[in-house]
Image: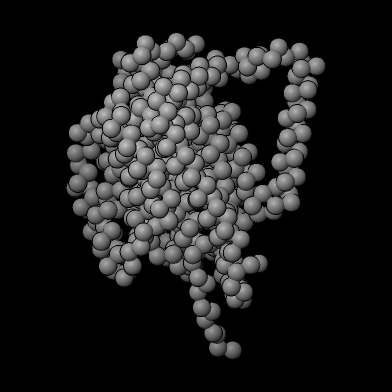
Amino acid sequence: MTGSGITMTPDKRNGFKDMDLAPVLMAIICGFLAAFIVVAKPILAPAVVAGFLVLVFSARYAEIPLAFFVFSFAIPAQKTLAGLPLNMADGMIVLWGAAWPLLMISRGRDIKIPFIIWAALPLLIAATLSLFVAVNPGGALKQVIRLVEWFVILPVLMMSLRPDKAFWERVSLLFLVVPSFFALDGVVEYLNHGNSITKMLHIPVPIPDEHKSQIRHTFDVSGRAGSAFGGAQGLAMYLAVMMSVVISVILFPARPVFRKLGIAALLLCAAGMFFTKSRGGLLGTLVMLTVLILTRAPKLGLTIIITGILAVGGGVFFLLLVYGWDGTVAGLIPGRPEAVLDRLIIWTRAIKVFTDHPLFGVGFGGFHDEVYRTGGIALNVGLGYESLHCHNTYLEVLTGTGLVGFLSYLTFLAACMTKLVSLWVNRKGLPSDGFILAAIAAQGAYMMFGMVDMLFLQNMHFMLLTILTLGFMAGQREPEPVKETTP
């Protein structure tokens, strides 16, 4: 084990007897209440925030708003306020922001600019510059506001967390419980013929107005589990990223009992992933596991990668000579090849938009407006209404902010991964090291999903930035002094 070399006294405690569960249980209960009120009645959000502020201040646990926030990842249903789309995660940001000064004062925390802000600063500047050439300035401004919320406000709010041993115990339990619930929700949805737990609790899914034709991957159309996301792909992406934390907690449990809970949570998440029947989700999970193994056990990881390359090569050889593959994408993809073919059509159009606006793009999120401004697009599966994105996060950044923003985005991803790998190499030998590992694996899954979907429409960035920040916090945490025991 690398790091400080301090020998820690083994912790033989097993169970919850000496653990303060009050803030975790309180956060779970209040998180559900917040979900109902903020999503169903946004006008009541200020009253909710004021009430929770008293709760947070009296409890003086920053883990409470963090718990609300982690619950919000899987509830992306939106309401519009003054033209700006808001969801439960935004409401939790408001709550946390109101409590932040009191939490900082009560803990005597210093204010330092988090690493994530420095890493994302070039992208934020590029997105702001794209406003001056945006096809839809109002829409681009909304996206820039969201970028600031994700990459600036959230890391600042997380400064109020106190990363001591008790914190890592609570946050480990939180990340075991929350994804398990939404995975179970997907399982119930599938086995109960679309009647999920969240549906019975009247938590809405994010779908367009009923009078608009739409592509929906919920159970009533495709028989695939989607939980509160309303779509199988959203649930699959969520579970793949969250499983990186679950597995890391199993490998580095803050308490022995967490390993048992983690195994149960992993089984639930795997079952939820199975019922999404998502090819992208499966691929994202495989990438996440490969990155995790490559980081944890480099030799084994390299063996897996080499085996995978040989398997792909052998598969292509088999398809060409035995299966009689004609070389087309439609002949290769089983089930719904039109979904893949439509992505190829969209990607070709995205490259055309980029070549027409190479430097600063058409404004963040402006691909949709540029396509319909220049004649629309013909797809195999008609949308029925004007809703379109690149189905690729990298192309969305490229078309929206041009080459300047695209290179800034890649720089952000590279900076975060490099920093995390450095923290992992110099880890402290603590259970919280698992969150460094989780952050590396989560970013790997995110980068894969970015190739097949547009993540700036999801709560994926909230989830990614939270896990990344926890990884940075874990890497910077110093071992707590060993308490001397009286013989």
Q: How is the image coloured?
A: one colour
In the rendered image, is residue 273 in sight?
no
User: Where is residue 425 shown, x and y percent of the image?
Assistant: 61, 61
Quadrant of the snapshot with the C terminus: bottom right
Viewer-closest of 50 and 162? 162
User: Which of 176 and 247 lies nearest the eye of the viewer?
Assistant: 247
Q: Position of residue 103 (x, y in %)?
A: 29, 63
Residue, x 75% and y 25% (percent of image)? 315
Residue 164 lies, with reference to residue 283, above or below; the image says below
Q: Residue furthest right?
A: 322
Q: Is residue 211 visible?
A: yes
Q: Residue at x 65, y 14 (%)?
A: 328
At x 50%, y 50%, the residue is 415
Left or right, 376 with reference to 450: left
Picture coordinates of residue 245, whole percent (x, y):
54, 50
> Residue at horizontal 48%, vertical 58%?
472
Name which quarter of the figure residue 396 lies in: top left
- Say how many tags the image has: 0
Q: Is residue 424 above or below residue 43?
A: below
Q: Quadrant of residue 258?
A: bottom right
Q: Quadrant of the N terminus?
A: bottom right
x, y (%) of residue 84?
A: 25, 34
Q: Is residue 121 above or below residue 339?
A: below
The outermost residue toward the bottom is: 487
Q: Nearer the viewer, residue 389 or 236?
A: 389
